[in-house]
Image (cartoon, rainbow, N blue to C red):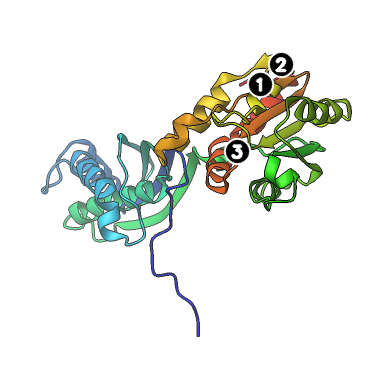
Amino acid sequence: MTNLRDKMVDITHKRNTLRIATAEATVLVSSQDTVQAIQNRAVPKGDVFEMAKAAGFLAVKKTPDLLPDCHPIPVEYTGVQYRIEGLKIIIELTVKTIYKTGVEVEAMHGASVVALTMYDMLKPIDKGVEIHQIRLLKKTGGKSDRKGPPEHLRTAVIVCSDRVSAGEAEDRSGALIVEKLGEYGLSVGDFSVVPDVIERIQENIKRLHQEAYGLIILTGGTGVSSRDVTPEAVLTLIDREIPGIAEEARRYGQERMPLAMLSRSVAGLMGHTLILTMPGSKGAVTEYMDALFPHVFHLYGVMQGQGH
């Protein structure tokens, strides 16, 4: 028996970013008389360009009402442009939003309704009017815009936990980080477990830095108990703190779990090694990885002199 998906795609893990999509549709008329009637606003049903544009705006906003798996989104801009090339009327419709999912479907739906409205208004005076290609021209926003990690990025994971180090508990968060990094084609070259002792944590970080690891992720020890010392261990080693990384991870987590505000995670550079600290729970690690990756990889390009 084939298993069919019976629910909408879950986008709760995604982050709000600026999403832009532009779609194109072509209306082909049969004579220059039709073109002139459109330009002169002499079509009996009214101003073709204005009516079709209004229909396109409505279509964009109504997209999730007609397509069952399309998420409702806050449409923050819709623009329609026309250009005439001979007997072709080319429609370009652009949609913008700041949200978790893209707007390419909204743009194509809007462009198709603009074309269909033009067809409906023109058919009384032009029996040969046709709608041609409807296509997505371009889209931006979301993870697809971000490049993956640089080639040969050496990656290490350190689990900071008294209980895991003593064999009293099983590591889950470190293993999850390894799994998540694998989604970006990264293999973890060094995986270690240390107790919540500043000196032991620092020994591992210094060793990995000397071995030219470019990314070190620590999990655990970022809370407020007396044994949570990971931030203290890291802050005395890094040359340049990057507050925005930890701030974004906490902000993202706070939208999903109010206790995220208690995390003391820090991030920064030790030479050219990026050091990230994450809480010790699987849920928090999932949130941190979703919040920071792949966007954080942009840092490596900047360090190599590439622009923003």
Q: Secondary structure at mark 2?
A: loop
Which residue is rendered at x = 43% and y = 50% of the image?
A: 11
Label 1 sits on residue? 232
* Vertical arrangement, residue 194 with respect to residue 241, above or below: below
How crowded is the residue under tag 1: few (<14 C-alpha within 10 Å), some, or many (20+)? some
Q: Residue at x 58, y 37 (%)?
A: 279
| Chain-order first, disc 2 or disc 3 | 2
Quarter placement of the C terminus:
top right
Please give the name of the residue rendered at 65% of the width and 50% of the height, measured from the top-left corner: 176
Q: Which residue is mark 3?
A: 293
Left or right placement of residue 181 versus residue 137 in this view: right
Q: Which residue is mark 2?
A: 236
Q: Nearer the viewer, residue 74 or 161?
A: 161
Which one is in front in this view, the residue at disc 2 or the one at disc 3?
Answer: 2
The answer, for residue 19, to whether it is visible in the render is no
N-terminal of the two: label 3 or label 1?
1
Numbered label attached to residue 209? none
